[in-house]
């Protein structure tokens, strides 16, 4: 038996050993691969979780408002004539009694002079009649003449007195017209637009006012409620009448057009008696002090009426997401799994939703990182305090 044949026989004898060793290597390789795969699986992500609480919170009902001065006074001429002077500019703040316009007073000055002359004439006639009565009176007493002449003289005297009174009235009327030639401010306030220029012919019968003066020490904000809002208002506040309910309303806030809140609060004072048949709304008015003149007629804003909710579930808006027009959160279930839950939202307060259904007090929800979650995923919850959120949020 040659050397090659001996080698082949030796290999055949060791085949079982080679197969056993190969199997052990293969088993060891598979086990190592499985172990490596187990060691590479990522742990559940750690996400902040907050417990839902029920707390008293103030909510606000908002209504669009139009702002006007407590009195917007149309300034109209009381006499006819040419506009001689304009003493103020549009938008100027004026005080009661300040001159605004001057109308040419010359025709009325002449009327006054004529009335004064007529008064002097009437007084002279009265003096003559009085002298005649004084002269006839003793003659009648001594039966020199009949009393008919004296009665006639007294009648002339009475007529002269009436003429004097009429002339005095004409003088006063002429003085009033002369006074009307200077148009003054009836109250403190801001001057509106002035559509006329110096030299324009103005008069009592003209359609357009000389200007509009806005008295703004107090400002009125007019707003409307829908029928549903009005029903809620009647149910929320006690009182036998609407006026009783209005008096129980708390002070209201005014949000200006730039979304800033007017620093002083106002009071709702008046409700219109009937609904507008076209719009289905009813009008209210709130009054705000305006000592600093910040508010002007024509401004717009929003009235905010506060309402205290004694127990509301507060859900941070940051912890929610929307799906098919519904608001959802991821709630923490057993084994730290998350489950999406739809919420019934009744209102907002600051950065929180007020929730009436879908959660209960004590439930835990994921606060951040919800964009990375799906139903059934397991997380490692990291509890955070609800009070800390409430302190940093604006309720």
Image (cartoon, rainbow, N blue to C red):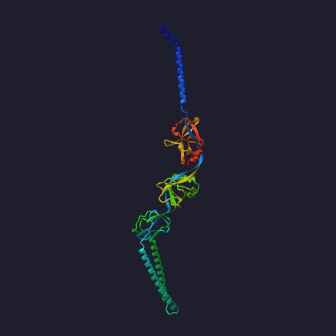
Q: Position of residue 96 (x, y in %)?
A: 50, 67
Q: Position of residue 55 (x, y in %)?
A: 60, 47
**Which one is in front, 170 or 37?**
37
20 lies above or below 155: above
- Would residue 226 be visible to someone looking at this image? no
User: Residue at coordinates 52% horizontally, 16% vertically from top-left?
Assistant: 19
**Which one is in front, 25 or 268?**
25
Q: Exactly how many numbered labels are in the figure?
A: 0
314 lies above or below 286: above
Q: Position of residue 323 (x, y in %)?
A: 49, 41
Question: Which residue is the extreme one toward the front?
Answer: 3
Left-right relation of 300 to 82: right
**Which one is in front, 172 or 154?**
172
Q: Quadrant of residue 264?
A: bottom right
- Would residue 34 be visible to someone looking at this image? yes
**Which one is in front, 170 or 290?**
290
Question: Which residue is the extreme one toward the top?
Answer: 1
Q: Position of residue 287 (x, y in %)?
A: 53, 59
238 lies above or below 313: below
């Amino acid at each position: 038996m040659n050397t090659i044949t001996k080698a082949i026989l030796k290999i055949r004898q060791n085949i079982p050993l080679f197969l056993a060793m190969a199997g052990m290597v293969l088993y060891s390789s598979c086990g190592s691969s499985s172990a490596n795969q187990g060691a590479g699986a990522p742990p559940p992500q750690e996400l902040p979780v907050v417990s839902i609480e029920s707390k008293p919170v103030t909510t606000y009902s908002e209504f669009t408002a139009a702002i006007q001065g407590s009195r917007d006074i149309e300034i109209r001429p009381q006499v006819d004539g040419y506009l001689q002077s304009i003493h103020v500019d549009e938008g100027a703040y004026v005080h009661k009694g300040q001159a605004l316009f001057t109308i040419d007073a010359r025709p009325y000055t002449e009327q006054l002079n004529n009335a004064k002359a007529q008064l002097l004439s009437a007084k002279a006639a009265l003096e003559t009649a009085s002298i005649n009565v004084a002269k006839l009176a003793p003659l009648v007493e001594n039966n020199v003449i009949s009393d008919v002449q004296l009665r006639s003289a007294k009648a002339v005297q009475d007529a002269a007195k009436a003429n004097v009174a009429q002339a005095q009235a004409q003088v006063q009327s002429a003085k009033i017209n002369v006074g009307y030639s200077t148009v003054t401010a009836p109250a403190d306030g801001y001057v509106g637009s002035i559509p006329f220029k110096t030299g324009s012919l103005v008069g009592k019968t003209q359609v357009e006012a000389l200007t509009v003066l806005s008295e703004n020490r107090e400002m009125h904000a007019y707003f409307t409620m829908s029928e549903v809002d009005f029903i809620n208002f009647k149910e929320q506040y006690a009182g036998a009448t609407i006026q009783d309910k209005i008096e129980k309303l708390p002070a209201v806030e005014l949000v200006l057009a730039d979304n800033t809140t007017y620093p002083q609060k106002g009071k709702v004072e008046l409700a219109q008696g009937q609904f507008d048949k076209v719009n289905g709304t009813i009008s209210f008015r709130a009054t705000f002090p305006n000592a600093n003149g910040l508010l002007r007629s024509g401004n717009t804003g929003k009235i905010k009426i506060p309402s205290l909710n004694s127990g509301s579930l507060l859900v941070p808006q940051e912890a929610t997401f929307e799906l098919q027009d519904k608001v959802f959160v991821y709630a923490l279930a057993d084994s730290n799994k998350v489950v999406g839950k739809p919420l019934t939202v009744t209102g907002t307060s600051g950065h929180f939703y007020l929730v009436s259904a879908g959660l209960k007090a004590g439930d835990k929800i994921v606060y951040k990182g919800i964009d990375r979650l799906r139903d059934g995923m397991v997380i490692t919850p990291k509890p955070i305090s609800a009070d800390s959120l409430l302190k940093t949020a604006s309720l």
